[in-house]
Amino acid sequence: LQSALDAIVRKTLYEAVEKEDLHLVGSPDITIEKLAPNNDLIYSAICSLMPEISQLADFNEISMTAKKVLVAEDKIDGALRDLQRMRTKEDKVDRAATMSDKVVVDFTMKKNNVVVDGGTAKDHAIYMEEHYYVPGLREELVGLKPGDTKSFRLKFPENHYQKQIAGNDIDYDVTMKEVYALTPPALDTAFAIQLGKKSLAEIRGLIGDNLRQELEITSARETEVELLEKLAEKSKFSDIPELLINDEVEKMMHELEHSVEEKGLAFADYLQSIKKTPNELKLEFAPAAIRRLKVALVLSKSASKLGITVADSELDEELDTIAKEHEQPDAKEKIYSPEFREYQRVILRNRKTIAKLKELMVKPAE
């Protein structure tokens, strides 16, 4: 009886769910009420239901205007300077550092005589003309020659990303290792020709186009998020199960951890820097998790209302495109699996739904 129990529960529960047309979230809580020879098996199942939208917002009541994308000249100037820096000649010199040099230093940072996390570096390069370093650091390095050492104190900005040292006085011990004189190329026609273009104006135009495309992509995403959140805000939902909220919070935690580790930081160190425990962070994520779930529900409901579907031919073409990017046979097998096929169908349907919603509710930028 015990061996047969799992199979029986799976089969009968599935039949009951299908009959009642229920959409479940997570695993049901099963309680066996009677399991004995020559008796009916009796069990109860408590299931979390996928929340429903009792009233979807009226598409006609929401209107937005797309943001106008403008590329500032100083952004183009900055990108041009980056290109110039990539072709700058560096000559090692035996003299005192100036504000136009590149220097290589070893340093240790201390707070109250204790080395701060990540506060030790070897052979760290500093471009003295750049302004994004801690205020006062470059000025302290001016005049140091290779082999010189210096100790000094700097106050970190209140808004510094490392919370444990933001607004604090930090003691530096610095050793100057190397000084390089920088000779950047002139920003002229010769420079443009080196990059395969005819003029500096053409280079600026290309930079402007690239920056504009990046801004347009960012702006489009921001518009999509704002649009869906407005739809969710004006729609009415049934209760969202705690199980679903917890799953979404866990997903957000994994996304954050991945993002932090991609930047070369340990997640534990990141939590320490913001002075939060995992549980505190999860509590803070809960409202955002609920918004994300509501947006997902709104998107699905909108697709149904608008009659958005994905033809098999569209899906086949999308899967073929994805498969071309993967050489391994096992990867291709996964791509063409029924599970991934349905997953990709949802993605395509969402994409088409968002495009239609923007067509209905977003006015072009003026």
Image (cartoon, grey):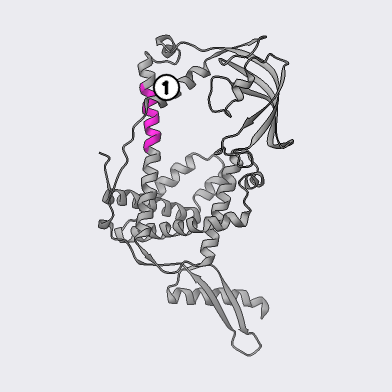
Q: Is residue 213 left or right of residue 136?
A: left
Q: Is residue 365 left or right of residue 168?
A: left
Q: Which residue is pictured at 40% across the width and 25% down the height? A: 74
Is 164 above or below relative to 155? below
Place residue 36 in its image quadrant: bottom right
Mark 1: which amino acid?
Asp
Q: Which residue is pictured at 35% across the width and 17% down the height? A: 201
Is 32 above or below relative to 357? below
- Principal secondary structure, stretch drawn in magenta: helix
In this view, the residue in front, 282 or 31, is: 282
Q: Is residue 214 magenta?
A: yes
- Residue 231, position as x, y percentages in the image: 35, 57
- Residue 254, position as x, y percentages in the image: 58, 51
**Placement of the C terminus among the 4 image quadrants:** top left
- Residue 12, position as x, y percentages in the image: 53, 77
Q: Which residue is mark 1?
A: 77
In this view, the residue in front, 33 or 172, is: 172
Crowding around mark 1 (Cα neighbors within 10 Å: few <14, some 14 to 19, many 20+) is some
**Placement of the N terminus among the 4 image quadrants:** bottom right
In this view, the residue in front, 33 or 334, is: 33
Q: Specify the farthest residue to the bottom.
A: 38
Is 173 above or below relative to 147? below
Q: Which residue is pictured at 58% across the width and 82% down the height? A: 43
Q: Which residue is pictured at 37% across the width and 48% down the height? A: 224
Place residue 94 in its image quadrant: top right
- Residue 261, position as x, y percentages in the image: 61, 42
Is 14 above or below relative to 223? below
Judged from the image, the secondary structure of the residue bearing numbered disc 1 is helix
- Bounds of the magenta segment: 205-216
Q: Is residue 89 magenta?
A: no
